[in-house]
Amino acid sequence: MSADIGIMANRILEMADQILAMADNIGMQADQILATQAAMNGSVATTQTAILNAQTAVVGIIVARRL
């Protein structure tokens, strides 16, 4: 019975090691998600600025043609 308990304890330790490895992977994936979100936020801001500038330019052209 002691031998069986020892075997089970070893298996539990192996599973704990696997759980820790999976937790590390989850943490790395979360970091990548945050980095991607930050990059996307910057991209959205840049796109909004470009659209606003294009809109302003087009309105300026339309106004200039009417004069």
Image: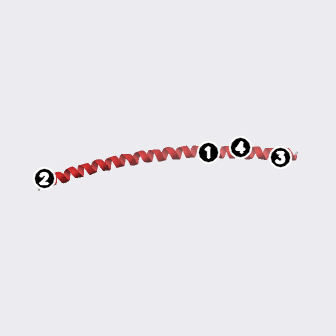
**Of marks 2 and 3, which one's residue comes earlier in the chain?**
2
Give the residue drawn at x 69%, y 46%.
Answer: 51
Kindly indicate whether the residue at mark 1 contacts the one at mark 2 (C-beta within 8 angstroms). no
Name the amino acid type tagged 2: Ala
**Of marks 2 and 4, which one's residue comes earlier in the chain?**
2
Mark 2 vs mark 3, foreground winner is 2
Give the residue drawn at x 64%, y 45%.
Answer: 47
Q: Name the quadrant of the C terminus.
A: top right
Q: Residues within 10 Å of mark 1 (few under 14, many from 20)?
A: few
Q: Give the residue at mark 3.
A: 63
Q: Give the residue at mark 1.
A: 45
Kindly indicate whether the residue at mark 3 contacts the one at mark 2 (C-beta within 8 angstroms). no
Name the amino acid type tagged 1: Ala
Left or right relative to 56: residue 39 = left
- Scheme of image coloration: secondary structure
**Of marks 3 and 1, which one's residue comes earlier in the chain?**
1
Q: CA distance from mark 1 to mark 4?
A: 12 Å
**Of marks 1 and 4, which one's residue comes earlier in the chain?**
1
Q: CA distance from mark 3 to mark 4?
A: 15 Å
Tell which of 2 and 56 is nearer to you: 2
Q: CA distance from mark 2 to mark 1?
A: 63 Å
